[in-house]
Image (spheres, rainbow, N blue to C red):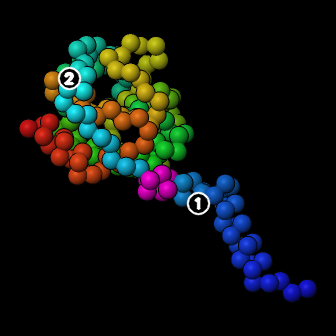
Amino acid sequence: MKVSRKTILNILFMAFVLSFFVTPLGYYGKVLLNQIFSFRPEVIEVGQQQQITDYNWKLKNAKWEFFNFEKSKGNVVFINFWASWRLPCAAELKSIQNLYDKYKDKVDFYIITDEEKLPVEEFMKENKFTFPVTYLIIGERSPLTILKPPSSYIIDKKGYIRVKQEGIADWDNKTIYNLINELIN
């Protein structure tokens, strides 16, 4: 029995597609596709921006110590809600790491998850992320709407929400850099 070239190509194609479901290649391929199809977030126009007036929000830092968001009042703030098990979050975090590397001394970063500490630490180590992790305390009141991950906010020094992004975004771009440069000066 002779196997045709078309049959061999079909088998190879099916094996490639199947690899996206049962191998690590599939995970990394899906992350890459999410990164390719993520776009820069839109800046909210003046007059459409909402202002935070109450910064009272209890959170936990990476050492599992409580702190209050009030310490960021008067600063430029980047907030991202994420979960290690959500593929779009994993895809977005690389651009957030680049943003953090560029502005870590000028912007307060809150990369917030509601997960337990151990799986988050393993995820951070595996992906070589160095941005600070903040842990959400479920049931604690918040000055912002807690959005479904992945989602983010950029807040200016006066408490105005300049970016509210629901869903995956590319944070490593000129528009965001220009906005943050404007906000920190």
Question: Is label 1 in a helix, a strand or a loop?
Answer: helix
Q: Is residue 179 left or right of residue 80?
A: left
Circles 2 and 1 in contact, beta carbons < 8 Å: no
On screen, residue 122 above or below 33: above
Q: Position of residue 40 (x, y in %)?
A: 33, 47
- Of 137 and 62, the residue lying toward us: 137
What secondary structure predominates along the stretch shown in magenta?
A: helix
The C terminus lies in quadrant: top left
* Residue on which disc 2 sits: 159
Q: Nearer the viewer, mark 2 or mark 1?
A: 2
Seen at 30% across and 41% down, the residue is 42
- Of 128 and 176, the residue lying toward us: 176
Seen at 17% across and 38% down, the residue is 106
* Residue on which disc 1 sits: 25
Q: Amino acid at mark 1?
A: Leu
Seen at 49% across and 56% down, the residue is 33
On screen, residue 147 above or below 128: above
Q: Using the rendered view, name the quadrant where residue 44 is placed.
A: top left
Specify the segment rendered in magenta.
31-37
Q: Mark 1, residues whose alpha carbon is within 10 Å: few (<14), some, or many (≥20)? A: few
On screen, residue 21 above or below 13: above
